[in-house]
Image (spheres, rainbow, N blue to C red):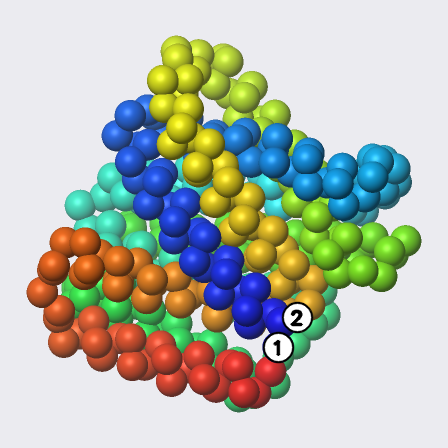
Amino acid sequence: MNWIVTSVMGAFFQNARSSIQKKLNTEMSLMASTYVRFAFSLPILFVVFFIYFGNFNYFIISVQNSNFITYVILASVLQISFTLLFLYLLKFTNFLVGTALSKTEVIQIAFFEFIILKDYLNFYALLGIMISTIGVIIFSTKDLKNIINGFFSKSTVVGLLCGTLLALSVVFYRGSMEFLEFTNKNFDRALLTLFAATIIQTSLITFYLLLFEITEFKKIKSNIKLSSLAGFFGFSATISWFYSFSLVQAALVRAVGQIELLFSYVSSRFMFKEKVRYIEIFGIIIFIFGLILVIFNK
């Protein structure tokens, strides 16, 4: 059951990173804010990688595997594309519906894992994922009328596409680990994949910023402390996710990882004393019921 612990850890650290990035979004461009997530986790990765492996021989062997590096590049580009499309989604007036439907990511992961990796879930685990996703959608929209009224809108298509991009990214990350046959240790595969992905993503966004938003580097420098925290929590979240992916199907991991919404809910209620809505409680109850099915029918 280690995968449950690391999945919850991933959700916790991701919620912390997201909170910091919300602050950074007010200080710099959205692309620059996304950049610090990768760039400031890279030094931590270098240190952890060298302490754990003692050298970079395993990494050199990994990148020489064409299947591995192809999957990691695909996953990295898809993850960045998801981020950009999701930011575009937030510009819509009815973005809540699209945002909620992007949460179908978990169901789509189960589908793509079956298509691409030939991996499948049992009936009750799949049912649990569907129920928990419905709970998350209800919780996210906070009004069922929003889903019905806004279903046939542009934001719906964009939201579903966001879920697809993220789902494919996760599946390719998990698939890339299966090509690292020279080691049978799950943490080895997780760390090697994360190291390669972070180098690729940092390089791509650095190139973009140098071309189109070079002044953002000054803003990043003036927010070095927050950026460093974002990097630390970003590393902690992603290594937790990747290690979980190496243990079980990614759909199960991301289903449990949706508990991040509960962390966000509790923190916002505690910090801002916002009034509790019954529809939110209803969504949480449905989510928990689905989560129980997932955990006990893995």
Could you tell me if residue 95 is visible in this image?
yes
Q: Position of residue 178 (x, y in %)?
A: 78, 58
Task: Name the residue located 62 percent from the left edge and 77 percent from the top edge.
Answer: 1
Residue in the image at 36% along x and 18% along y: 222
In this rendered view, identify the residue nearer to me: 208 or 276: 276
User: Of circles 1 and 2, which is in front?
Assistant: 1
The quadrant in which residue 25 appears is top left
Q: Position of residue 189 (x, y in %)?
A: 76, 53
Q: Position of residue 89 (x, y in %)?
A: 31, 44
What amino acid type is highlighted by mark number 1? Answer: Met
Q: Which comes sooner in the sequence, label 1 or label 2?
A: 1
Pointer 2 residue: 248
Q: Secondary structure at mark 1?
A: loop
Q: Is 238 rendered above or below residue 200? A: below
Mark 1 and mark 2: span between their CA atoms? 10 Å
Within 10 Å of the Cα at label 2, are there few (<14), some (14-19), or many (20+) other Cα atoms?
some
